[in-house]
Amino acid sequence: MYVVCKEHVELAIDMFVDEYEDAPDVVDLKETKFSDWDPPVKCKECENKAEFLVV
C-alpha cells in the first residue's frame, strides 16, 4: 500500500507491480473516507500532500 501525491502515482504503481506482480487499485483520497483508518497527510516519497492510495 502506498499513499502518494499526484506526482508520484506512476512510481507507486510501478513499485506495486514490481512487488506484487499484479495491477493495483488507485483510490482518490479526496473522494473516499475511511471509518477505521486515517490516511497519512504527506506523500510517501516527498513532503507534498497525499492525494492517492495505491493498493
Image (tube, rainbow, N blue to C red):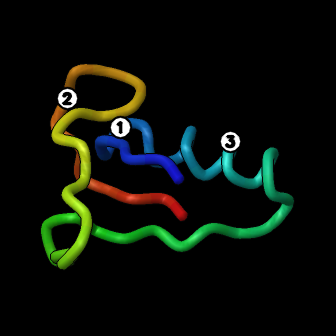
Name the amino acid, label 1.
Glu
Residue 48 placement, left or right of 46: left
Is 54 situated above or below 22? above
Is 30 situated above or below 19? below
Number of numbered discs on residues: 3
For marks 2 and 1 on the same chain, the one whose residue lies earlier in the sequence? 1
The answer to which of 50 and 33 lies nearer the viewer is 33
Q: Secondary structure at mark 3?
A: helix
Q: Tell me how far mark 2 sits from mark 3, CA to CA.
A: 19 Å
In the picture of the structure, the residue carrying the numbered disc 3 is 15
In the picture of the structure, the residue carrying the numbered disc 1 is 7
- The answer to the question of whether label 2 and label 1 lie on touching residues, with beta carbons closer than 8 A, is yes
Image coords of residue 27 (percent x, y) = 37, 71
Q: Tell me how far mark 2 sits from mark 1, CA to CA.
A: 9 Å
The answer to which of 7 and 44 lies nearer the viewer is 44
Tag 2: Cα neighbours inside 10 Å, few (<14), some, or many (≥20)?
A: some
Residue occupying the point 75% across, 54% down: 17
Residue 44 picture quarter: top left
Residue 1 placement, left or right of 33: right
In the picture of the structure, the residue carrying the numbered disc 2 is 48
Image coords of residue 21 (percent x, y) = 85, 60
Residue occupying the point 53% across, 53% down: 1
Q: Quadrant of the C terminus?
A: bottom right
- The answer to the question of whether label 3 and label 1 lie on touching residues, with beta carbons closer than 8 A, is no
